[in-house]
Image (cartoon, rainbow, N blue to C red):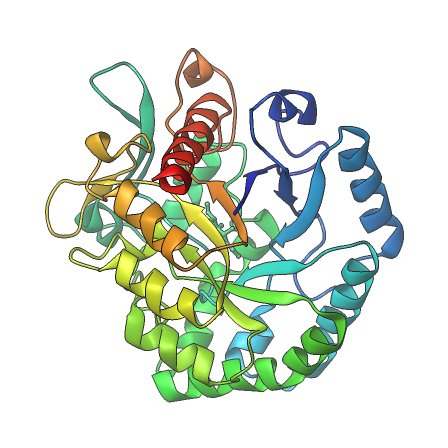
């Protein structure tokens, strides 16, 4: 595996590449050009500048997280073709600068969601939390306003997207699951041949959390639906970002089995590895990465990756805010220290697995 770290980009992240570089064992970062709206082609000069900035710190950038999918594509609107063409242009330009994997998601309207962004834990740190009834009692606008007040910005909750939230939610009303799958297939049919030609691994991220919010369809949430999605275009380049925290937020999900099944077929390209602690059947908070801190068995998860000889990219995922980060403005879940501890912990497990 290659251990990486998420960096939101110049001017978009309070954490610098110089700090990230000091985390032991990292090969590189995963990043994006967050200011470019979904549906537009990424200009080559921007990709080049990003690449040069990261290379100057002796870090690699081989994974983009994310190139977002425009809502018109998910909804299957006639305007999707132009957005898909732009997506392909972006893929071509990224390939030219050494990008080997693109993470994206098919979540309708909202990327990941939490009820609390800075939930206090007894040890003085804080973390993100998901309380299902809390979210159900909010309107979409109230949730967006809550995030806007508490955070500089949630990745995936870009202000431009959120301005049209009511309109976009309405567009999904009554959409059947099969229509959604057909729209995804239309997208995959168009882009995967280019991914094959460019040798770019496409890695869809599961829906987070794996339960409906505001009545929106949530499809990529479990083993069967992942199978269905990957079968829409049976190419190795149509693969998965295995996110333990997203799939693992469904109680009872067998993450190691999912890793063995899809990883064994070479369909897992990128992994987000983190833990969470269940409070009841649906609610959880995001704990430190250690097995002893949460509900997921991180040793079994890493062992499954080891069993399949995983050579793809891994990153620690959301961390708690610790050591005074609580007072610093930052993107929820993406402070420096707890994620750095996570990166080192996961590498420790890996080293032991290599030596057993
Ligand atoms: C949250 C992230 C997601 C992820 C996208 C991928 O922390 O894991 O926002 O980047 O869903 O497109």
* Residue pictured at 52% horizontal, 22% vertical: 329
Seen from the viewer's position, the closer of residues 39 and 44 is: 44
Give the quadrant of residue 10: top right
Give the quadrant of residue 119: top left
In this rendering, position of residue 26 left or right of residue 249:
right
Q: Which residue appears farthest toward the top when viewing the image?
A: 324
Seen from the viewer's position, the closer of residues 289 and 306 is: 306
How many numbered markers are drawn? Answer: 0
* Residue pictured at 69% horizontal, 21% vertical: 18
* Residue pictured at 37% horizontal, 27% vertical: 320
Q: Position of residue 16 (x, y in %)?
A: 66, 24
Name above or below for residue 61 compared with residue 264. Answer: above
Name above or below for residue 207 compared with residue 351. Answer: below
Q: Which residue appears farthest toward the left when viewing the image?
A: 280
Give the quadrant of residue 199: bottom right
Q: Quadrant of the C terminus?
A: top left
* Residue pictured at 47% horizontal, 21% vertical: 337
In this rendering, position of residue 144 left or right of residue 254:
right
Q: Position of residue 220 (x, y in %)?
A: 37, 69
In this rendering, position of residue 12 left or right of residue 197:
left
Q: Position of residue 345 (x, y in %)?
A: 39, 30
Q: Which residue appears farthest toward the front when viewing the image?
A: 356
Q: Position of residue 300 (x, y in %)?
A: 26, 47
Seen from the viewer's position, the closer of residues 236 and 162 is: 236
Name above or below for residue 110 compared with residue 88. Answer: above
Q: Is residue 176 among the parts visible in the rendering?
A: no
Seen from the viewer's position, the closer of residues 307 and 121 is: 307
């Amino acid at each position: 595996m290659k251990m990486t770290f998420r960096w939101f980009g110049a001017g978009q992240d309070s954490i610098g590449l110089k700090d990230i570089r000091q985390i032991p064992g990292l090969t590189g970062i995963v990043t994006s050009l967050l200011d470019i709206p979904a549906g537009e082609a990424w200009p080559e000069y921007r990709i080049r500048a990003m690449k040069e900035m990261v290379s100057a710190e002796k870090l690699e950038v081989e994974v983009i997280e994310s190139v977002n999918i425009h809502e018109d594509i998910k909804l299957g609107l006639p305007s999707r073709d132009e957005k898909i063409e732009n997506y392909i242009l972006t893929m071509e330009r990224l390939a030219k600068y050494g990008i080997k994997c693109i993470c994206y998601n098919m979540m309708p309207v909202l990327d990941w969601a939490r009820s609390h962004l800075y939930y206090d834990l007894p040890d003085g740190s804080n973390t993100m939390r998901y309380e299902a009834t809390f979210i159900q009692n909010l309107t979409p606008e109230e949730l967006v306003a809550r995030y806007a007040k508490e955070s500089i910005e949630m990745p995936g909750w870009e202000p431009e997207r959120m301005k049209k939230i009511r309109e976009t939610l309405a567009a999904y009303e009554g959409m059947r699951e099969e229509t959604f799958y057909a729209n995804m297939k239309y997208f995959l049919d168009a882009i995967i041949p280019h991914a094959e030609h460019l040798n770019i691994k496409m890695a869809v991220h599961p829906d987070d959390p794996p339960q409906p919010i505001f009545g929106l369809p949530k499809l990529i949430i479990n083993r069967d639906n992942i199978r269905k999605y990957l079968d829409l275009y049976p190419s190795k380049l149509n693969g998965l970002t295995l996110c333990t925290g997203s799939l693992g937020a469904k109680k009872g999900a067998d993450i190691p089995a999912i890793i063995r099944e899809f990883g064994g077929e070479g369909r897992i390209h990128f992994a987000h590895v983190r833990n969470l602690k269940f409070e009841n059947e649906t609610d959880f908070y995001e704990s430190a990465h250690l097995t002893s801190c949460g509900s997921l068995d991180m040793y079994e998860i890493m062992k499954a990756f080891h069993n399949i000889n995983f050579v793809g990219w891994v990153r620690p995922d959301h961390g708690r805010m610790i050591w005074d980060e609580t007072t610093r403005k930052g993107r929820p879940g993406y402070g420096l220290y707890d994620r750095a501890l996570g990166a080192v912990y996961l590498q420790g497990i890996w080293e032991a697995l290599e030596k057993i």
